[in-house]
Image: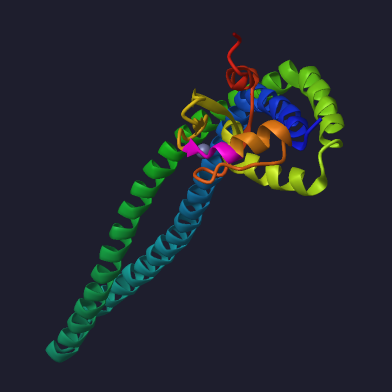
Amino acid sequence: MSETAKLLKVFLVDKQLSGLTARLRAAERFLGEQTSQLSSLEGSKQTIESQLKHLGASVANQEGEMARLDARIEQLRNQMNSAQTNREYKAFLTEINTIKADRSKIETVALEQMAQIDALRAQSASIDAELAERKRMQSVAADDKTKRAEEIRERVEALKQERDALAREVPAQVLAMYMSLFARRDEESMAAVEVQDRKRHEFTCGSCMMSIPVETVNRLMTHGTITRCVSCQCILYMDAAATEAMQPAKR
Ligand SMILES: [Zn+2]
């Protein structure tokens, strides 16, 4: 059996395996997407939680500071009421006003930060809802993947064994070239020669439809050496239809 014929056997099993595992691979991709979205949401949630913690501590500090200033104002008012002179009274009043201005600045910042806290809490709640939905999707996706894998497990095992046995018949170098091709082109890795017109020597590649020289077809027919389409790089072979078409017409 020629190298091309041996490789074709491997390719036909690979095609079956690829078709069989396509749904499993789609399920795995979907699960991967759910998992990565979930971890990105968890990251956002963590960022918000740490911002909330920071802002909460800041507001608590400002409230403490305002309470301290309120007590100081109260104390100054009492002192002001028992002031002996007008000058003394005015001095207390000035100090009270200065403290009130400071307190007002602190209060403005505290109110702004409380508004930020409210906004972040709302954001956090909407992330929680999204997280719950995403977790549900992830669990559906995981079940689906397990189910798909289970469905095809035995068939895939059998095909893999068959493939391994067939692949052992193919020279290592050829197999390596084919495998890197298959990783890129999948079902388009090998293509049958199409005989358009035998007498006029018109042959095309079954994958890219570009023409193939008659010498190439003859070489494939007689030796079956590994031959690649110069246009699309797929490995060419003669299928039953092409071989039949190449037979000289019966009289
Ligand atoms: Zn081609």
Range drawn in magenta? 211-215
Specify whether residue 169 is painted magenta.
Answer: no
Query: Does residue 10 appear to the left or right of 236 in the view shown?
Result: right
**Which residue corresponds to the image point at 66% horizontal and 46% vertical from the top-left?**
180
Q: Quadrant of the C terminus?
A: top right
Q: In the rendered view, tell whether residue 134 sits above or below residue 122.
A: above
Residue extending furthest toward the front: 251
In depth, the one of 179 and 81 nearer the eye is: 179
Q: In the rendered view, tell whether residue 64 sits above or below residue 124.
A: below
The image quadrant of residue 159 is top right
**Which residue corresponds to the image point at 69% horizontal and 19% vertical from the top-left?**
147
In depth, the one of 68 and 165 nearer the eye is: 165
Query: Does residue 175 appear to the left or right of 164 in the view shown?
Result: left
Q: In the rendered view, tell whether residue 26 sits above or below residue 124.
A: above
Residue 224, horizontal then vertical, whole percent? 72, 35
Residue 176, horizontal then vertical, whole percent? 74, 47
**Which residue corresponds to the image point at 33% horizontal and 74% vertical from the top-left?**
72
The image quadrant of residue 141 is top right
Residue extending furthest toward the left: 86
The image quadrant of residue 217 is top right
Q: Is residue 139 visible?
A: no
Residue 83, horizontal then vertical, whole percent? 21, 83
Query: Does residue 204 appear to the left or right of 223 in the view shown?
Result: left
**Which residue corresponds to the image point at 33% horizontal and 54% vertical from the top-left?**
116
Residue 126, horizontal then vertical, whole percent? 41, 37
Query: Does residue 80 appear to the left or right of 65 in the view shown?
Result: left
In depth, the one of 65 and 188 nearer the eye is: 188
In depth, the one of 123 and 108 nearer the eye is: 123
Q: Is residue 131 visible?
A: yes
